[in-house]
Amino acid sequence: MKLTLRRRQILWAYAFLAVSLIFFVAIRWYPTLLAFNISFRDWNVFQNNGPWIGLQNYQDIWEDLFKQRSAVRAAFFNTLRYVLIGVPIQLTLGLMVAMMLNSIGRAAGFFRAAYFIPYVTSLVAVAFVWNWLYAPQTGLINQLLLALGLPMQGFTKSPQQALYSITAVAIWASLGFTVIIFLAGLQQIPDVYYEAAQIDGAGRWQIFWRITLPLLNPVIVYLSVLQTIGFLRMFDLVRNMSEQGQGGPLNSTTTVVLEVYKEGFGSYNMGYAAALTVLLFLVILLITIFQLRVLQRRVEY
Amino acid sequence: MQHRTYTLLITLLALSALILSACAPAAIPTSPAPAGGAAVTEAATEAAAEAAPGEVIEIEYWQYNFEARIKAMDQLIAMFEEQNPGIKVIHNSEVPYDNYRDKIAASVPAGVGPDVATLFYGWQPVWVSEGYIVPLPEDAFPPDKISAEFSPMVQASFQDGKLYTLPTAVRTLALFYNKDLMEQAGLDPENPPKTLEELEQQAVQCTRLDAQGNYEIMGFPVSMTGQAHHWFREVLLRQFGQQPYSDDYKQVLWNASQGGYDAWNELLKFQTELKTGDATLFDGDPNFFLNGKACFHIDGSFRLGTIASSAPDLNFGVVELPEHNGVKSTFGSYWTHGITQKAASDPARMAAAVKFLQFITTPEAGALWVKETGELPAQLSAASDPELLADPKLGAFAAGLPYARSTFFVDESKDRQALIDAYNAVVLNGADPAGELDFAVETVQALLDEYWANR
């Protein structure tokens, strides 16, 4: 059979696509789907049989959710808190910085790079540096407080402050990404709208609320979905910033993913851990659909 | 359009999940079927003779990455291979401590991993109930002989009357003291605390605060993420007349009497009442002691190596843990070696693994180990060596061997976490000490109940 040039090109395209597709199927999809299966089993890693136990793992999670002070209960509530605190602050700060960067001409490239650097830094390295900054007594921040005559703070060692301290680092670490996306969004807005508004005598606030924000809507939706997923999957920072990586003190910083890790690789309850993953997956799916539905508005001028 | 994509995606996911769930365990990766324990060990000893001359059997040995232990084990392996030309031991010590258990867990479904593995004795119950390690053959390791020749704490390696693992070396806890700081505080560095009362009094005297009331020098910081939880379970409780668990390890007894609560209050007292330190300051455990910021510190013999390499100029001494009500006690623990299902599935490898394990648990191996790592030999004959007892640093640990106790942990990390949480709830949130101890007991009791329910 003779192939036309076009057909041949298409075949080649598929051949190249197949390489990454095989990778995705084998390394991502297959294990992901396997997690669904494992969540219905009492599978301990050391045993290779894993009997089918139906919904028992889910029932155990359900019971743990109502147990006072259980780690899993704390994990769900904390994860919710990370999202509710982290995402709005992240977006607000990101937009503010982006608008400021957008309005300066000189050294804009330098500032953009400066804001972006934390994002390309390994989160584990970030966690260690912040651990030292936060350190009680010897840390830089506490030394500053001391020099100013203020009382020293516990930060990650205090059950009341730990979650906020870690959220702050998470925001700091990925602010650069938010800023860059917002910048791109801002530069998409045609200048003629602003000029027309100014001629019509619109104030700065009016321009912001009536033009900038509505036209940024797709960017805001994209970022809020992405950031929500990011905060729902919070793990690296907590694992490296809480005492011995256990999500303490007193479970005040633990997250669902950290509990998955602790159950799976600390206590070898793979079935329970897989069930937690599936629940997290469903939560992410639902929230994402909800956000896309509710936040997405078409703005036409 | 978007709507349809999601519906499609969800349907696809749901479908695949269903298909995968419905199909048999085949979906879970399987390693070569391991044979049952007892039958294998008998076959193994026979196969040892069968192994054809000239044929080299390779076995894999794993331990976590810790320089002194690697050096010691490399020497032992070289000696062993010289004596047994037919066996080659591959030494894997690349895995960092934090990932050691993960790596082992991941290696099993993959069908690779160690034939002989080093594990913390506290992990043993889980590894045994998961079927990962097999009982040691009785002809090679006669239980009576082991009980007579090894330190009493090694009893924790017996489960249901069967010996599963055996250590080269053991560790005990003792009290470290900083001589310079004691002198600065007007204490006699040649007279460290012998009783709890003396520890309290000297720790208070040694504590130094700056103008704002922050610790400059901590007398005695109680480090729960370090060894203090062990000190509570096996030492303080016993000194206040309360044994930590029932003899059959089915009941947690920490709050079974007023003595239990008294022991708990004693532990808390240093931070809440006497204010002799806060272990989370100064970079955490055990850096406060290494940096010369603490006078007294409870730790194991393994810390001697860390101090020698990280703080060689520290002027310190070590004494036995302070006694109370005339009771002496210390916590003993050990890293122990077990033989895995992987070795047991092949008689020739099993025989080689048994030989290797016998070799690394001899008194000679223990004597070499103590020189390299500072851990005490597990064999009593080596541990009662007068030279060792006279050692100014190791002597205090060796003196603890005859009365050391180790805890049988169902889930060491959760048991420890329960006590850490109870302690933190009191010192950080001002919760009621008695209520928190009760809650910790409840948590750990639930772990025990779950463990014994399956037996």
Image (cartoon, coloured by chain):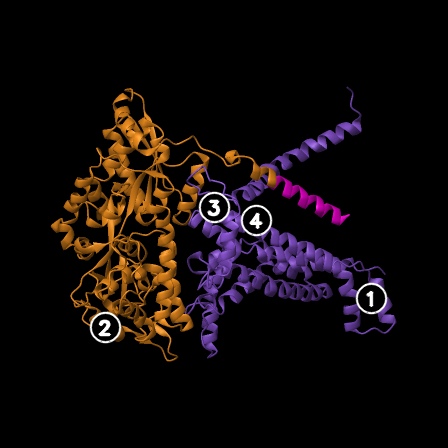
Mark 3 or mark 4, which has the lower sequence index? 3
Kindly identify which numbered label has been placed on residue A278: 4
Q: Is residue A191 left or right of residue A87?
A: right
Crowding at mark 4 (Cα within 10 Å: few <14, some 14-19, many 20+): many
Q: Residue A108 carries which label?
A: none
- Which secondary structure lies at badge 2? helix
User: Which chain appears purple?
Assistant: A
Do labels 3 and 1 touch, CB within 8 Å? no
Residues at marks 3 and 1, CA–CA distance in whole angstroms = 56 Å
Q: Does the magenta stretch include residue B15?
A: yes
Residue A125 in view in this figure: yes
- Numbered disc 3: secondary structure: helix
What residue range appears in magenta? B1-17
In this rendering, position of residue B393 left or right of residue A231? left
Q: Which amino acid does label 1 sit on?
A: Tyr
Q: Which amino acid does label 2 sit on?
A: Gln
Kindly identify the residue that appears in the image at 26 percent across and 59 percent down: B234
**Mark 2 burial class by Cα count in 10 Å: few <14, some 14-19, many 20+:** many
Q: Identify whether A289 is placed above or below A100.
A: above
Subunit ID for the residue under disc 1: A
**Residue A50: x %, y % from top left:** 46, 40
- Viewer-proximal residue, A278 or B53? A278
Main secondary structure type of the part rendered in magenta: helix
Alpha carbons under labels 4 and 1: distance apart: 47 Å
Tell me the amino acid under the disc marked 4. Answer: Val
Q: Do the residues at pointers 2 and 3 share their chain?
A: no
Question: What is the C-alpha distance between the residues marked 4 and 2?
Answer: 55 Å
Kindly report the distance in space between the C-alpha atoms of the residues bearing marks 2 and 3.
49 Å
Q: Mark 1 points at which residue?
A: A194
Q: Residue B262: percent from the left, percent from the top?
A: 27, 70
Amino acid type for the residue under numbered disc 3: Met
- Residue B235 in magenta? no
